[in-house]
Amino acid sequence: MTPIEGKVPTRLALFHGLGSIAYGVKDNGLSTFLLLYYNQVLGMDAMLVSLALMLALVIDGVIDPVIGYLSDRTHTRWGRRLPWLYLAPIPLGVVWYLLWAETQQPTFWGLVGLVVAIRVLVSCCEVPSIALVPELTRDYDERSRLMRYRFLFGWGGGLLVMFLAYNVFLADGLLKPEGYRAYGLTGAVLITGAVLLSALAQHRIAAGYPPPVRSKFSLGTAFAELRESFSHRAFLILLIGGGLAYTSQGITFSISNYLYLFIWRFSPSDLMLFPWVLFASVVACFMLLPHLHARWGKRDTAKVTALLGAGFWVTPFLLRAAGLWPQEGTLASTFPLFLLFFCSNVFSVSAMISASSMVADVVEASEEQTGRRSEGAFFAGNMFMAKCATGLGIFVTGQLLAFSGLPQKATPGEVPMEIIDTLSLTYAAVVAVFAVAVSLVIRRFPITRADHEARLAALAAARANPDAEGMHP
């Protein structure tokens, strides 16, 4: 594939982003509804559910770098990425439906097996898809533009199934089991259709035999090359910062329904409106982020917006603890909550998009040192980090619920206030600490716009003169 010079056509950017709907649907289900469903509906212990999810993530995460490495080395007339995008989505849709078709409490290992299968298949779709970003363009800003479309569709897909869950499938109550099967079936159709359509729309530009791989494949070679790539300083910084950010996000997503039901006392109409508030915030981020990157670059945007996002998010929790927040469940409480959560999500998503685009810029930094392009490996490594961190976040949520003393199958409005206060303050403190840590780590990322453009020029000169001393072919 030859990278596109100049602006990536909008149609191509749209269809590329479409594939991330699968990741959004998966993230919404596993992070927002699964703990609630298996704990409060099927009756599994919250700590066991969160432990199963974390264990599944770790098992899957070990596999992710191998998927990325194999994607980099796939050599077919359809290119490196398309075969994965055609083969993985159908079995993924089937297993996704099975996860939500449970009507009886499963075994611990049964839940682990289902979630591992889903996450491995999601990786087989998402890693090759997102690895196309640095292949489609080497432009500093166009990579961010492609990432903005990916996040827009990812969030859109996740919020669409959330909206349908709150207003159609689970409209009679989040704790009733009947609607979860329809939720799973709808998600399966969206996942399968989005990935296949995205692949078909990109076929013309992505198909074609890639350059041959110079090193012979073996497990020893694979892990040696992965270790060399992953030891790059810029990538390690992103792994640490991203690990902190995704742990915090995993906590927030998995605890969100507990917050909405037990602390903020959202009504059914509030739950109907809230996904639209979140989607509007992602659209606002989509429009705002190019201006932030033009002014500050990706690194500084990420470190500032991470703090701003957490600041807006924890404000109502702190005001509530100080006795300065209106009565929960009233319009006086819900309207300012929506406004603060809107602002928080604008900045939080800005930080995530910026960091994801920074991963693409590591590709050339590594190529300069190793002579290899490892798009799939880097994005798989990033996904490995995100999954492990999200699993840790879900596990922490289980501990927070246990620490607060929230009982199983609890009824909103009937839980003692000291339990609710403990849950609220502990959660807010955890989010604030993680945000400060993320900002402190990301500020050390060494690649700026000027660094990236100078590196592209150096690599182009090296290709033109492969015998020059110190230059990789």
Image (cartoon, grey):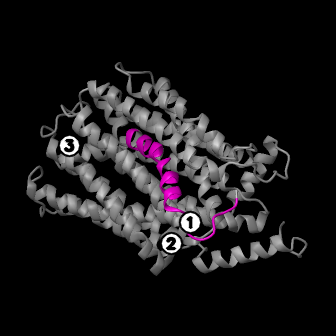
* Picture residue at 34% right of the left edge, 61% below the top: 283
State yes or no: residue 20 in magenta: yes
Quarter of the figure with the C terminus: bottom right
- Residue 426 location, x and y as percent? 30, 53
Q: Image quarter for residue 184?
A: top left
| In this picture, residue 259 sits left or right of residue 247 | left
List the residue tagged with mark 2: 298
Give the residue type at disc 1. Met
Give the residue type at disc 2. Lys
Residue sticking out furthest to the top? 104
Q: Is residue 371 above or below residue 186?
A: below
- Residue 106 location, x and y as percent? 41, 21
Query: Helix, strand, or loop for circle 2?
Result: helix
What is the total number of numbered labels drawn onto the structure image?
3
Q: Which residues are magenta?
A: 2-29
Q: Is residue 143 visible?
A: yes
Query: Helix, strand, or loop for circle 3?
Result: helix
| In this picture, residue 307 sits left or right of residue 142 | left
Cβ atoms under marks 1 and 2 closer than 8 Å: yes
Q: Image quarter for residue 319?
A: bottom left
Cβ atoms under marks 2 and 3 closer than 8 Å: no
List the residue tagged with mark 1: 358
Report how far apart the C-alphas of labels 1 and 2 lie in the structure: 7 Å
Q: From the viewer's side, name the closer residue of 331 and 124.
A: 124
Q: Image quarter for residue 323?
A: bottom left
Query: What is the crowding at mark 1: few (fewer than 14 residues within 10 Å), some, or many (at least 20)?
Result: many
